[in-house]
Image (cartoon, rainbow, N blue to C red):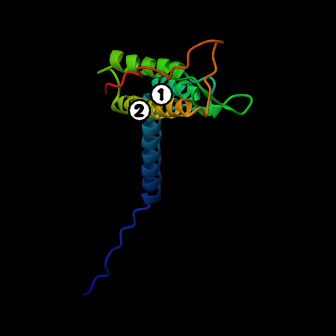
Amino acid sequence: MSEEPKIIIDSDWKQQAQAEKAKLAAQAKDREQARQAAAGPAGASPDDPNRPIDFDDLIRTLASQALMYLGAFPDESGRAMLAPEMAKAYIDMLAVLETKTKGNLTPEEDSALKGVLNELRLQFVEISKAIAKAIQEGKIKPQGAPGSPVVPPTGGPSLRP
């Protein structure tokens, strides 16, 4: 009376699993290609000499020049180069860039530019005060053309946020 249960074996399950695996791999590959296409050439390594220059590179270039003139990097002789007037010029260039690109930057670019500008402005003020104090105390003598007056930097970079 009792019937033995009939077992149905799906012999096609391996093929279905392989097909599903291939389909998922293709979807993942398509997503990766779309991500790389969206990243474009900017997704290239920062050390790649063939990658196009982007906005962050411009910010870094101008900021590093300002820092150099604020004494952050030594010259060939190993001494810090202090030229606040030159640092001010580069900081002001970044400020012009901020003004001219307002509303046209990505949030990351805007944040990077504002952060760099704020940091450079603070460093400029600190260095200028230190130079003025050292000159006043006779610890340093400004280097310049013979007979040029000893004047600490006046003004400052555009300090408005």
For this rendering, which residue is in front, 138 or 144? 138
Reading the chain from its start, which is encountered first: label 1 or label 2? 1
Residue located farthest toward the right when viewing the structure as drawn:
77
Secondary structure found at label 1: helix
At label 1, the amino acid type is Asp
Measuring 66% from the left and 12% from the top, which residue is drawn there? Answer: 146
In which image quadrant can residue 9 be found? bottom left
Secondary structure found at label 2: helix
Image x and y of residue 75, in percent? 69, 28
Mark 1 vs mark 2, CA separation in Å: 8 Å
Label 2 near label 1: C-beta < 8 Å?
yes
For this rendering, which residue is in front, 12 or 67? 67
For residue 41, side relative to residue 115 (left or right): right
Image x and y of residue 151, in percent? 51, 20
Measuring 33% from the left and 74% from the top, which residue is drawn there? Answer: 6
At label 2, the amino acid type is Ala
Measuring 61% from the left and 34% from the top, which residue is drawn there? Answer: 139
Q: Image quadrant for the N terminus?
A: bottom left
Q: Name above or below for residue 7 compared with residue 42.
A: below
- Which residue was labeled with disc 1? 56
Is residue 53 visible in the rendered structure shown here?
no
Q: Which label number is shown at residue 112?
A: 2
In which image quadrant can residue 134 be found? top right
For residue 139, side relative to residue 6 (left or right): right
Measuring 46% from the left and 38% from the top, which residue is drawn there? Answer: 32
Is residue 116 visible in the rendered structure shown here?
yes
Q: Name above or below for residue 27 compared with residue 42.
A: below
